[in-house]
Every structure is written in structure tokens, then in C-alpha cells.
Amino acid sequence: MFQLGKSTVFGLDIGFGSVKVVQLKKSGKDISIVGFAREPIAEKSLQKTKILEKNKIQEALKKAVKSAKPHAITTKAVCAALPEHLVFTKVIELPKIKENALAKTIPYEAGEFMPISLEETYLDWQILGDNPDKSKIEVLVVAAPKTLVDDYIDLVKQADLQLFALETKPISAVRAIAKNEKEGLAILDIGAEASGIAIVDQGIIRLTGTVTVGANMVDKALQTNLNLKPEDASKIKYESGLSFKTETKTKEIIQQALAPITDELAHTIKYYQSRIKAEGKIAKIKLCGGGAAIQGIADYFSRQTGIHTEIGNPLVHLSKSSEKILSKTDALPYTTAIGLALRELG
Ligand SMILES: Nc1ncnc2c1ncn2[C@@H]1O[C@H](COP(=O)(O)OP(=O)(O)OP(=O)(O)O)[C@@H](O)[C@H]1O
Ligand SMILES: [Mg+2]
């Protein structure tokens, strides 16, 4: 019989523009795509702090699970990712103590930096390795608002699925496109309505930031400034974007729309280097999310930041033949979902 191979969970990414699902399978060493799908959701379904229209998202999720290509999703277990700006993440340094004593110390320490009370959050932590100072340990502490987590559990349950694991979006993105990077780097996920920034060192996320500007702003700016119909604006964005093919005025409009992202990225890198790791080198910037598919965008960020910028490859851990199902460019909006689907494949 047709063997689907090892595949226990699928990845679910709820964004401001769409719900995305990806299921992968592993046969021997080869990882390939079982199915992927994207269902658009109405602009107001997801709020900055909570899921507003659970029903609409739930419908989109059910639809995506069924319509995934080349095969419908075959498992009910879901790995989902929370937006990082709603989750408090911090690396804290503690004197070396026994692991069971951490359960008492960490909530106390976490209470010091969290803007909401401990009773209102779910707390989790992970000891980070390779600390040069052996008398201390570094612990990554993650605190997620209970209301948000409960919303996700509910949503998944109502779609007749089970929530297997939750993490934050940058963790999924690192797994998908930057797992083996040794040098410090920045990941920039350009979404529909927002963009996420993560500073990663030795594969560990040290700092995250968010800008409420995404690739949809490019459409809006082109429509307003050049008096274009939505379909014509999106044609420019998809086909010529920031490449040499685009005339100067149009390029300037696109650059202006993206400027808040460039500014926040530069600011986050500066903050990292001044407050978290003095002289911490950021060797490169890796782009992902649908906005990373805008023509010429990597060169634009290289020029603006002075840091080498490249487009991440969300298919890097997948077999070569996966590209026949989903091209590297078309996979960019699926970076988070692919990272989630990779989680249980080791
Ligand atoms: N090939 C492409 N060329 C240019 N832009 C693209 C391309 N593919 C997708 N986009 C744009 O990317 C954006 C959607 O990206 P993505 O799917 O990553 O967002 P999202 O995850 O739903 O939203 P958010 O991250 O804001 O929550 C849209 O603005 C879309 O027009
Ligand atoms: Mg997104």
C-alpha cells in the first residue's frame, strides 16, 4: 500500500492575511510535502491581541485542511505558532542551581520583567547550553497570555483537530530557514499587515521585534500615489517590484512603503549590539514571508542596512523534488508553517 511515512503533525500558521497549513512526511532521510494550503481571512478576523472572529478562522482552517495539495491533510494533530509580540520571551541568567529548584526560581524571576501578572500567563522555559561562564546558566523563559493560548486550543478543537504543540513564529522560522547558521543573523518575516524581526545567535533567538507594516502597504501606496486599480498595483509588486525593470518613481513609492520596516530592523540590530551583546556581529539578514517575494527586495535591504541580505529558502530541509510541488518563491509565505511541520520530524 502507499506509505505516507513518518508524519504525526501538521503546521498551522494564522496570519493577518491568511491561514496556512503544511504537512510534511519523512521517508528514510527524505522529507517531502504531503499537502499545503492557504485560505485568505477577512482583514479584521485577527486582532493584535486576540482572535476576534473565531468562526471565520475556524472555517478557513477546515477548508485549508481539506483542500491541501497534492494531498489533503491526513492528521488531526496540530503544531501552531503564536505571534511573538503577544508572548514575552527573555533570556535570563541564573546561578547554577538544580533543575527542580528552577521551578521555584523562574516564576519569581519572570514576575520581575513581565507586564502582566503570573496568574494570567502560561510559563515555560528551556535551559540554553554553551555558556562560557560555567557558574551560571542561561534560561530562555517564555510566558504566553492564558486568554490567547486558550483561544488557540478552542479554535483547533472546534475544527475537530487537536493542538499538539504551540511555539512562537520566529522559532518556527529559524527551524525552517536558519537552523544550521553559526553566525549571528537577523530574520525578517514580511507578512501581509505586519513584519517580524528576530535576532538569532548560534541558532538561539536573542531578541524579537514587530512592525505593523507588511507587504500590503506596498499595494496601498501604489494605488494611492499612482491612482492604480488594486490588480494593477499588485501586478507591479509581483512582477517588477524593486528590480531594475521598475521606473524610478514607482520604486521610490515602494521603498517609502517599506521604510518603517527598514528603520525598525536597523533599530533592533542597534539595540541588540548596544544592550544585549556588545559588538554582536550580524553577518546577514534572511528574508521570509510573502513580502520576501517582492522582486529585488534583498538588494534593497542590503543597500539600506549595509548588511548582506538574502532570501531564505523554506525548502532547504526538503527533498529536491518538493520544488515540483511548491517553488522556493511560492514557499516563502509558508516559512512558518513549514518550520512547524518540521518540528516533529527531527
Ligand atoms: N510572489 C509575490 N510577490 C510579491 N508579493 C507577494 C508574493 N506572494 C505574496 N506576496 C505578498 O505577501 C503578503 C502576504 O504574506 P504572508 O502570507 O507571509 O502574510 P501573513 O502571514 O498572512 O500575514 P502576517 O504575517 O501579517 O500576519 C501579501 O502582501 C502578498 O501580496
Ligand atoms: Mg505571517
Image: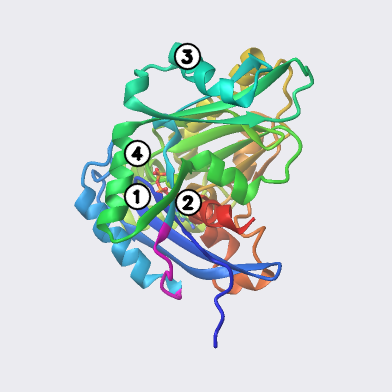
Residue at x 73%, y 46% (from the top left corner): 180
Residue 85 x, y percent position in the rendering? 42, 30
- Among the two numbered marks 1 and 4 on one chain, the one whose residue lies closer to the N terminus: 1
Quadrant position of the N terminus in the picture? bottom right
Inter-mark Cα distance, 3 to 4: 22 Å
Pinpoint residue 40: horizontal percent, then vertical percent. 32, 57
Residue labelled with disc 2:
290
Report the amino acid beneath label 4.
Answer: Val
Numbered disc in front, either 1 or 4: 4
Label 2, ligand 1: CB separation under 8 Å: yes
Query: Is disc 4 in contact with disc 2, using a CB cutoff of under 8 Å?
Result: no
Residue on which the image places disc 1: 17
Of badges 3 and 2, nearer the viewer stands 3
Marks 2 and 1: in contact by CB < 8 Å? yes
User: Who's the residue at 48% across and 60% down the image?
Assistant: 9
Please tell me whether residue 329 belongs to the stretch shown in magenta: no
Task: Name the element at disc 4.
Answer: helix
Q: Which residue is mark 4?
A: 149
- Where disc 1 sits, the SS reads loop
Q: Is residue 139 above or below residue 316?
A: above
Mark 1: give few (<14), some (14-19) or many (20+) Cα within 10 Å.
Answer: many
Determine whether label 1 and label 4 are within 8 Å by CB. Answer: no
* Residue segment shown in magenta: 70-77
Q: Amino acid at mark 1?
A: Gly
**Extreme residue in the bottom direction:** 1
